[in-house]
Image (cartoon, rainbow, N blue to C red):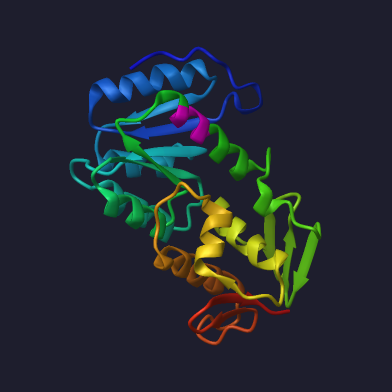
């Protein structure tokens, strides 16, 4: 793995957990991430990855899919089920297309196919950390209205945080981006494909189910009754619309 020597000043000191069982890949990633100014922890199997994710509170996780003890998708599912919202980037073999789709549906921030370009991976890490900490926003998050209220929910777009009845709502960067995508088009129906393109971009692989899962997560966090939503409406055969 080629060493990339470049510091990322605004993200220096962020903690990255690498969960990878191939020692050569893991060590290469650690060297290059540390050269970028990050603090790096390594785990060589899924169980160790879970322990470090819970104890070290990383700002981002690079998570291989094929791991001993617990595979990467199981680790991802467990962390999201616990309400942990740090960006998680899946590393998967290029042939394992379903791993990529499943990772997105389970709440992964992004994925990078193996063998990967180191420069591309580091760029994805920077982008995910910036999205997660409000250091830079893409087109989806540059909402026309800086603060939005509906029901007992307050969305501060500039600060990238959500409160319900005055209490913070834990939300991943992708969940927030899907929410703002809908809020930007209040009253207008967006297809699943349109939402996916705006939030994930044209180069990502996913299915309509990816968007459906994120909508379900948002309803569970923001609606009084997720089975009878008031704000995030399904338009059968088309997509979703935000009312309110």
Provide residue 67's location: percent of width, then percent of height.
22, 41
- Image height of 226 relative to 143, above or below: below
Closer to the camera, 204 or 14? 204
Q: Main secondary structure of the magenta part?
A: helix
Examine the image and state in which quarter residue 117 appears. Answer: top left
Residue visible at 33% across and 17% down? 1
Provide residue 146's location: percent of width, then percent of height.
81, 57
Image position of 166 (left or right of 48): right
Q: Count numbered badges in the picture.
A: 0
User: Magenta residues, as a range?
Assistant: 120-125
Residue visible at 56% across and 63% down? 194
Closer to the camera, 51 or 145? 145
Examine the image and state in which quarter residue 29 appears. Answer: top left
Q: Is residue 121 magenta?
A: yes
Residue visible at 55% across and 74% down? 219
Provide residue 90's location: percent of width, then percent of height.
37, 43
């Amino acid at each position: 793995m080629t060493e990339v020597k470049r510091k990322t000043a605004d993200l220096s000191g962020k903690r990255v957990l690498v969960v990878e069982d191939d020692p050569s890949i893991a060590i290469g990633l650690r060297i290059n991430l540390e050269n970028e100014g990050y603090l790096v922890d390594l785990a060589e199997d899924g169980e160790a990855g879970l322990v470090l994710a819970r104890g070290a509170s990383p700002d981002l996780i690079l998570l291989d899919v094929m791991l001993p003890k617990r595979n990467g998708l199981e680790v991802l599912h467990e962390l999201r089920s616990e309400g942990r919202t740090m960006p998680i980037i899946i590393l998967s073999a290029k042939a394992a297309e379903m791993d990529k789709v499943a990772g997105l549906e389970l709440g992964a921030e992004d994925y990078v196919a193996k063998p990967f370009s180191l420069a591309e991976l580091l760029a994805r890490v920077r982008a995910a950390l910036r999205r997660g900490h409000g250091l830079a926003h893409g087109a989806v998050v540059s909402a026309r209205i800086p603060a939005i209220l509906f029901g007992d929910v307050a969305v501060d777009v500039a600060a990238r945080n959500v409160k319900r009845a005055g209490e913070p709502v834990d939300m991943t960067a992708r969940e927030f981006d899907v929410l703002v995508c809908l809020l930007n088009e209040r009253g207008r129906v967006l297809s699943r494909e349109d939402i996916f393109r705006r939030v994930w971009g044209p180069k990502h692989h996913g299915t309509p189910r990816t968007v459906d899962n994120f909508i379900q997560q948002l309803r569970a966090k923001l609606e009084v009754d997720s089975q009878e939503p008031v704000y995030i409406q399904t338009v059968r055969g088309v997509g979703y619309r935000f009312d309110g």
